[in-house]
Amino acid sequence: MSPEHLRDAAGLAAVFGFFAMAWFGWAQEKPPASWLWPLRIGSILSGLTAIGGGLLLWRHWSDGTVFGDRTGELFGITVGIEFALAGLGAGLLAWRRRTELIPAWIAFVVGVHLFPVAVILEIPAVHVTAALITVAAVASVFVARARALTVSAVVGATTGPVLLVSALLALADALTR
């Protein structure tokens, strides 16, 4: 991932690991039986990665970071917009009785919000994660329909691994400094 600061690499590993675990969990809503063990293993690996990143982040909390007053403000605004759009879209989908599409919408918003996050945090590799999640979100709807699967299973089974690999790369980066 190559953030400038070890602390930021560790934080990325913790956050991406945590959210990978969440996506692997969401994928366990009515997946094909053959997917259960890989999804469970993905959840466990994601949790361990989040813990590893979190412990390293804690250990290096006083080290340098890209976060300053302006960076923190921009990051907070970006995350606030993400939450607002995710919530409004999910509410609209629920109102339209299209709740099966909520996971894809949430993943789409997450993917799109990672583009400005990559710029704010000065981590160009996050653009790859953003693109893969955005594509996974859109493609999951079509794949789920074509294969008679739940959208949540498909979007979780694609978004989880993207975040896990990104978290593992960030953790490896932090550990090798």
Image: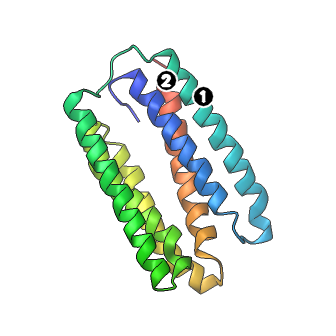
The answer to whether residue 94 is seen in the rendering is yes
Which residue is most to the left?
A: 70
Determine whether, in the image, residue 147 is placed left or right of residue 63. right
Q: Is residue 65 above or below residue 165?
A: above
Display coloring:
rainbow
Residue 33 versus residue 110: which sits nearer the camera?
110
Looking at the image, is mark 1 or mark 2 earlier in the sequence? Answer: 1
Residue 75 picture location, percent across and down: 29, 41
Is the residue marked by circle 1 packed among few (<14), some (14-19), or many (20+) residues within 10 Å?
Answer: many
Q: Amino acid at mark 1?
A: Gly
Q: Which disc is residue 57 wearing? A: 2
Residue depicted at x 37% and y 45%: 126
| Residue at mark 1 | 52
Tell me the CA gap for discs 1 and 2: 8 Å
Residue 158 versus residue 91: which sits nearer the camera?
91
Q: Is residue 44 above or below residue 96?
A: above
Residue 145 sits in which quadrant?
Answer: bottom right
Residue depicted at x 68% and y 48%: 43
Residue depicted at x 70% and y 56%: 39
Residue 133 sits in which quadrant?
Answer: bottom left
Q: Amino acid at mark 2?
A: Leu
Q: Which disc is residue 37 wearing? A: none
Determine whether, in the image, residue 93 is placed left or right of residue 145. left
Residue 175 picture location, percent across and down: 52, 22
Residue 119 sits in which quadrant?
Answer: top left
Residue 172 picture location, percent across and down: 53, 29
**In the rendered image, which quarter contains the C terminus?**
top left
Residue 168 picture location, percent across and down: 55, 37
**In the rendered image, which quarter contains the N terminus?**
top left
Q: Is residue 159 above or below residue 34?
A: above
Answer yes or no: do the residues labelled 1 and 2 have beta carbons within 8 Å? no
